[in-house]
Image (cartoon, rainbow, N blue to C red):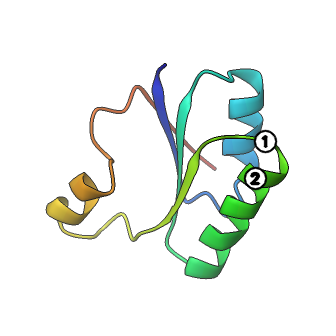
Amino acid sequence: GERAADFGAGTGAVGVALALREPTLDLLLVERDPRLAELCARNLALNGIAGRALALDLLSPRPAREEAGLTNLDLVVTN
């Protein structure tokens, strides 16, 4: 499926809603705050979504962003 990321995901509400609408998405929720990234992961699990949640500052050096899988995205959302 297409690869999508929610940047600044917070608790993951936007990404979860997107994944529920488009279940074939390969979803990555990216949040700078590790505690919020944990909530993202929990919300993915509670909603039966096989996405990933990641604690990462988007201003991190490029190699860190590439290692996290933030390349070749088909869709990026933010709120």
Please indicate whether residue 10 sits to the left or right of residue 60 in the image: right
Can you tell which quarter of the image residue 72 is in? Answer: top left
Q: Which mark is residue 45?
A: 2
Residue drawn at x 76%, y 23% as measured from the top left: 21
Kindly identify the amino acid type of the residue bearing the numbered disc 1. Answer: Gly
Mark 1–mark 2 distance (CA, rounded to whole Å): 5 Å
Please indicate whether residue 79 sits to the left or right of residue 39 in the image: left
Q: Are marks 1 and 2 in contact (CB under 8 Å)?
A: yes
* Depth order, front residue of 64/8: 64
Residue beneath disc 1: 48
Kindly identify the amino acid type of the residue bearing the numbered disc 2. Answer: Ala
The image shows residue 4, relative to residue 6, as above or below, that is above
Residue 17 % position (x, y): 77, 37
Please indicate whether residue 2 sits to the left or right of residue 45 in the image: left
Residue 18 % position (x, y): 70, 32
Residue drawn at x 49%, y 19% as measured from the top left: 1
Residue 77 % position (x, y): 55, 40
* Depth order, front residue of 44/8: 44
* Depth order, front residue of 76/22: 22
Badge 2 local density, few (<14 within 10 Å), some, or many (20+)?
some
Can you tell which quarter of the image residue 51 is in? Answer: top right
The image shows residue 31, relative to residue 25, as above or below, that is below
Residue drawn at x 69%, y 32% as measured from the top left: 19
Residue 5 % position (x, y): 49, 42
Q: Secondary structure at mark 2?
A: helix
Badge 1 local density, few (<14 within 10 Å), some, or many (20+)?
few
Q: Secondary structure at mark 1?
A: loop
Please indicate whether residue 68 sits to the left or right of residue 39 in the image: left
